[in-house]
Image (cartoon, rainbow, N blue to C red):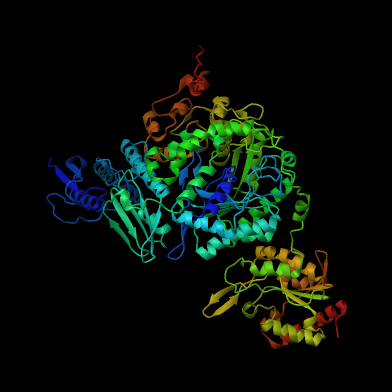
Amino acid sequence: MEMRTVTLADGADLAGFRRAVRLLIGGDVPPEAVVWSPGEAPDLFAGEGTQEGRPIALPRAVGDLVRLVVCHRDPERYALLYDLVWRVTHGERHLLEVMSDPLVHRLHGLRKAIGRDLHKMHAFVRFRRLVDDAGNERFFAWFEPDHFIVEETADFFVDRFRSMDWTIVTPVGSLHWDRENLAVGPAGRREDVPADDAFEAGWRTYYENIFNPARLNTRAMRAEMPKKYWKNMPETASLSGMIENAPSRVRDMIEREASVPAKRNPTKAVAAMDEQEPKTLEELNRIIAASEPLVPGATQAVLGEGPTGASLAFVGEQPGDQEDMQGRPFVGPAGQLLNRALAEAGIERGQTYMTNAVKHFKYEQRGKRRIHQKPTTSEIKHYRWWLMKELDFVRPQLTVALGATAAHALAGKQMAVGRNRGFIDFDGRSGYLTVHPSYLLRLPDEAAKEAAWRDFVGDLKRIGERAGVAA
Amino acid sequence: MDEKLRKKLGVLADAAKYDASCASSAAPKRSGGAKGLGSTTGAGICHAYTPDGRCVSLLKILLTNYCLFDCAYCINRRSSNVERARFSVDEVVTLTIEFYKRNYIEGLFLSSGIIKSPDYTMEQMMLVAKKLRKDHGFAGYIHLKTIPEASPWLIEQAGMWADRLSINMELPSRESLKQLAPEKNGATIETAMGQMHERITEAREEKRRFSPAGQSTQMIVGADATTDTAILTTSADLYGRHKLKRVYYSAFSPIPESSAILPLKSPPMQRENRLYQADWLLRYYGFSVGEIAEGGTDGMLDLEIDPKFAWALKNRARFPVDVNTGEREMLLRVPGLGARTVDRIIAARRHTRLRYDDVARISAGMRRAKAFLITADYHPRHLTDSLGLRKAIVPQPTQMSLF
């Protein structure tokens, strides 16, 4: 049998291995006829020059395994991987699923070691900040991984610290990020990294204090944070003291008698706690105005408007496009229609309180237009707490629900407008249910519009009489 | 770093260490991009370990340890003489950002003593999270310990910024709560958890952001007389009814300034460990609380052996199981076989008949498993019913030498 020797670069030579595998599989060369010789001359496939073979289709899991295992220091890694590729392409396509197979078991062990090495690097790298003369900051770290994982780890650090300039130096290579590009550089030394950082003392303080001396278990600590990492982790400088003092700290705690409680008498403070809810409408409105809309997008919260103590309160659905921009309820087309209807019914708008069940505009952007979207049941529910408080401050004699959403919010349950139109009890509040003025705007033909308008004005007249505000 | 701030950090980290959870998992994968800071990977990372063997993943601090409540088991109760401190919202934001930039942490776990009112306190905590997200584009993990007495709108707002919200059960029974935490109310806590579950479910359906990594809770073990079975019944109920992501068990540990109505000694750490194992059996292995209880005595778990092994010893008639044909549910009940190992066995047996050595390569737990399973070339025979089975597994205490 003719033996073939494959020479690969030092470290994790994925490209070289891939090129070799394509040629070997293409040439039907069995694993026992290949000698893998990593780390000698860079990237030479002896005898074949820079010839390229055809790509080989492999299950995704095999590709992922290869990418990781080439990072391992085990000199046999390439031979083991080629063995795997050979078997997968010669009748054992699902070989990786057979964890009981000695080869798969061995490779899995190597992959696990790489996974652990990557994980520890993600976890234990410690950056130190350095500001140059021009005032630009850059973060530096020195780390000593077990395997050739530096490039494999780059995505993680770029993803996490994309907005910072940073450099990670290791004995097997370095990474440099300038907020746009990643550069892979040569190995470096610990001295390439600053010796201290302004926040390290604080971090050590945190580390010392988050430890519970009553639960000393150094074996568990060492299993997860082996000693070899300690020299590059600033907090571990505190370890010996923490461990030594732990038993005596616990003894002290137990021996110390239960001390006499401090003299503070909290009765008043505890009582005051029960009165945490907003005391005035202004206070409530401050809270609503400062809150974030449940669904992002609204310009501002649209608060209720009108005198407290008004005998009539109107509750709409939610602010629309115009209301959202002006920050006032019922100022858009539906609001103007409502104004006309109120005037015809002899009700002065300024004497009434106007608000909405939901305080933020929700919409879908279509081109330049913002198309109103109906609030969901849970949105109505979340805003309900505020609406109830608001009406408690205003204390109207009659609360008018304009449309189904308002009725839902006031009653705490869904309610059809058609069947319940008229005077109604909203969860203990005397109310009246009618249509939302935007309903009138949506009616297609003039005759229907005319009839609906008459009904709506009729509703308002009844409302005005009951509340005693009709002119 | 400012010396005054460092001192406060010492006090407010010390005050937070009795909270067991430090998990940074289950958040949706995301990254802060070109302007923001940070990322979440889904799995969470432990950035250091302290000598108690615990993982340091998040900056776990209290906003303040001043507190109006007087919960006997808590070091921060108003009647304790412990040193007090209070962070401003901006100080917590600065610490989180600066620690994160140095790769010390995955994010923030913020809790607080209750000052002024539950609403005031909750609002301050919510503002920390809001500032981190809005002003700093912070994409790391945020866990807020919510205050069950706070108004609903505050919980709602907090859930928009946090990855996880939690409410502590504190004690596994209402009676103990009444006795040891006079200002707390078991019903309020349970209602708050129920509402939290509702909100999380609704938001998920409507694709709104609200505590995407779910809710968790913590119970203190050993400060009262509640049995393990009663604790696990509470947990099973929380997992079932409110879909909690995790229930944490915290072995009561003696605290400085201890209250006179508490036991002075901590319960064996092993009890906490066994509870976590039992909790795992509830969630991933198809066990019921009743079955787990069979392995123990008088409502307490066996401290010497793990609960799955304890159950198997009492149910030997159901073993041995054939690894090549056994149902997944039954393989999961074999001591020594974890859920991942079982899945690997099932994947491998589609392609090959498993022999003893094959299973030994997949599983590291054969010492315990071998009495309970059959392979193509192996049968445990009398081993399954052997009286010495327990003794063979339990570590024998070494004789003390007297002289």
Task: List x then y, in percent, for residue B145.
Answer: 61, 51
Task: List x then y, in percent, for residue B160.
Answer: 59, 61
Q: In the displayed image of the protein, which residue is found farthest to the front?
A: B3
Q: Is residue A24 left or right of residue B40?
A: left
Q: Nearer the viewer, residue B331 or A289?
A: A289
Task: List x then y, in percent, for residue B167.
Answer: 64, 49
The quarter of the picture where residue A4 lies is: top left
Q: Is residue A128 left or right of residue A23?
A: right
Q: Residue at x 51, y 49 (%)?
A: B58
Q: Residue at x 59, y 55 (%)?
A: B87
Q: Nearer the viewer, residue B55 or A265?
A: A265
Q: Is residue B284 visible?
A: yes
The quarter of the picture where residue B295 lies is: top right
Q: Residue at x 64, y 68 (%)?
A: A290
The quarter of the picture where residue B282 lies is: top right
Q: Is residue B327 visible?
A: no
Q: In the displayed image of the protein, which residue is found farthest to the top?
A: B403
How many numbered discs, if any?
A: 0
Image vertical order of residue B31 relative to residue B104, above or below: below
Task: List x then y, in percent, for residue A57.
Answer: 29, 53
Q: Nearer the viewer, residue B196 or B294?
A: B196
Q: Nearer the viewer, residue A304 or B314?
A: A304
